[in-house]
Image (cartoon, rainbow, N blue to C red):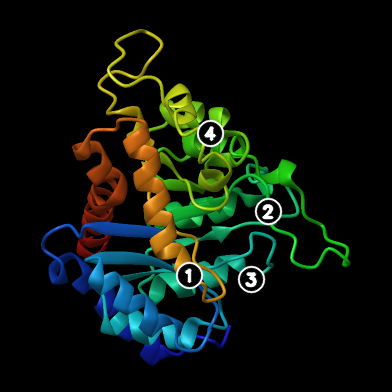
Amino acid sequence: MLWMNKWTAGALLAGSAVIATAQTAPPKLIDVHEHFDGEPGVLEQMLVKLRAADGMGFLLVTQKGFPEASKFIHEHPDRFIGFGDIKLDDPNVLQEIDQFHQAGFRGLGEITSTEKNYDDPSYWPIYDRAAKYHMILLFHTGIVLRQHPDLPQNVSFERMRATRLDLIARHWPKLIIIGAHLGNPDYAEAAEISRWSPNLYFDLSGSSLIKLSGNYEFFRSIFWWSGVVSPHTAPGAPNAFEKLVFGSDIFQGELGEFDAGQKRYHEMLETCRVPQNVQAMIFSGTMWRILQEQQKAIDADKAN
């Protein structure tokens, strides 16, 4: 692959090392789901919004967007963290992961529209490589948009169900996994598999908080185990809602979702009477802790 040159890779390696020191206190907001495909002017607009919110964004970067995004991430390591947008069925995917890692990217995603189920054994070498580099994985889960319904596609909701993440989370227990969209519409299944896997989280971006806006209490029924002490709940588990992290799913430059997504999250969490300290974990604390742990693992590898 020739789309990453040596200068860019070296620059981003330096940038990734700065992340832990450039931001000594957790930001108020970490958005785990911001797409970038090279749209003109979008990164500058994202930066304005993140600064205003005291936020940090996981930038899901395609090969098309990489040249601009790599420079931007290096210049603003306190606001952006790079995720490589890979295709599991790409024959060069392992090489691409190596190159994203060399460029200082901290995760991979949004993984979507695969030719086989996410947990198919043919994809296991990819997850092995991600685990080797301590990368975070962001998977699309549930229904997926169909931008060109007049064209045939080899795409299936069935392959991308949230339950496909269960085996991955169990087989790679140190691999942090985020499922986008809480498995829409399989919310209960998504919540239940996250209940037993401390390395599995979900965002609620997309249409779910729109279609359920009149029934936000529903989420109390699927995140039911807060404070429940039982052989049927994980010992010492945090508040059930802490299995959620914030994601806006900005794509194609539609930055309005950054603000709209926050508003919907807040309305749902307030309706469900989620304590403020738990909301702080959802919007920032959980991912900040994960990033610090990830940085320690990366530093340990470098020391060895």
Q: Secondary structure at mark 2?
A: loop
Residue 18 against residue 134 in the figure, above or below = below
Q: For the N terminus, which image quadrant? A: bottom right
- First reached walking from the N terminus: tag 3 or tag 2: 3
Q: Which residue is mark 4?
A: 190
| Residue with the mark numbered 1 | 98
Q: CA distance from mark 2 to mark 1?
A: 28 Å
Q: Which mark is residue 92?
A: 3
| Residue occupying the point 32% across, 78% down | 47
User: Label 3 to label 2, Cα distance in Å?
Assistant: 24 Å
Crowd class of label 3 (few under 14; some 14 to 19; many from 20; radius 10 Å):
few
Q: Nearer the viewer, mark 3 or mark 2?
A: 2
Please identify, in this view, whether the residue under mark 4 or under mark 3 is nearer the observer: 4
Whichever of callouts 1 and 4 sits on the residue coming sooner in the sequence is 1
Q: Given this view, does label 1 or label 4 mark the residue nearer the observer?
A: 4
Comes first in the chain, label 4 or label 2: 2
Please tell me whether mark 2 or mark 1 is closer to you in this view: 2
Say which amino acid is labelled 2. Answer: Val
Q: For mark 2, what is the residue?
A: 144
